[in-house]
Image: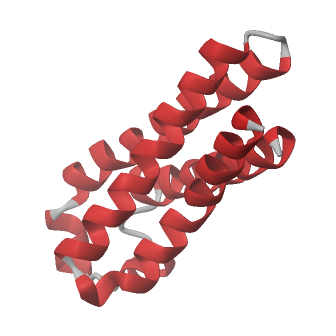
Amino acid sequence: MVVAGLIFAALAGVLHVYIFFLESLRWTAPRTRATFGTSTEEAAATKELAFNQGFYNLFLALVTAAGIVGVLIGATAVGSALVFAGTGSMLLAALVLLLSSPDKARAAITQGTLPLLAVILLSLGLIL
């Protein structure tokens, strides 16, 4: 179960790197605007906020990746703590999105499913 948890954590990290790419590097591009449902004007007005938020997503992915490496090299306690910090933050951010903007439920579920599975499977793997 630990391996399955780490796989889902890695997938969650990859998704958050992709979100970083969209928010920090491609925010005003037509395809990204379509993905997030923003107009040209909205994207221009929120570009700095999206840039910052994208880096937040990147840092969560990096913390998760560092944790995965830690577990794989045998530093299970530290690695697991980092994986839980990264994926737990991803999961809670998805929950905040869902509760604060129910119209974005699909995005919140997409953002939160992989971290949720990672947390559950890693927890079970460490307990059992």
Where is residue 59 drawn, in percent x and y?
46, 33
Up/down of 89 relative to 68, above or below? below
Q: Quadrant of residue 46?
A: bottom left
Q: Residue furthest left?
A: 45
The foreground one among 42 and 124 is 124
Where is residue 55 drawn, in percent x and y?
39, 39
Q: How many marks?
A: 0
Q: Residue at x 71, y 50 (%)?
A: 121
Q: Is residue 93 visible?
A: yes
* Left or right placement of residue 86 versus residue 24 in this view: right
Where is residue 33 drawn, in percent x and y?
38, 78
* Left or right placement of residue 99 versus residue 57 in this view: left
Where is residue 89 drawn, in percent x and y?
40, 44
Q: Residue at x 28, y 68 (%)?
A: 97
The foreground one among 86 and 56 is 86
Q: Quadrant of residue 34?
A: bottom left
Up/down of 56 relative to 99, above or below? above
Q: Residue at x 48, y 60 (%)?
A: 22
Q: Residue furthest bottom?
A: 103
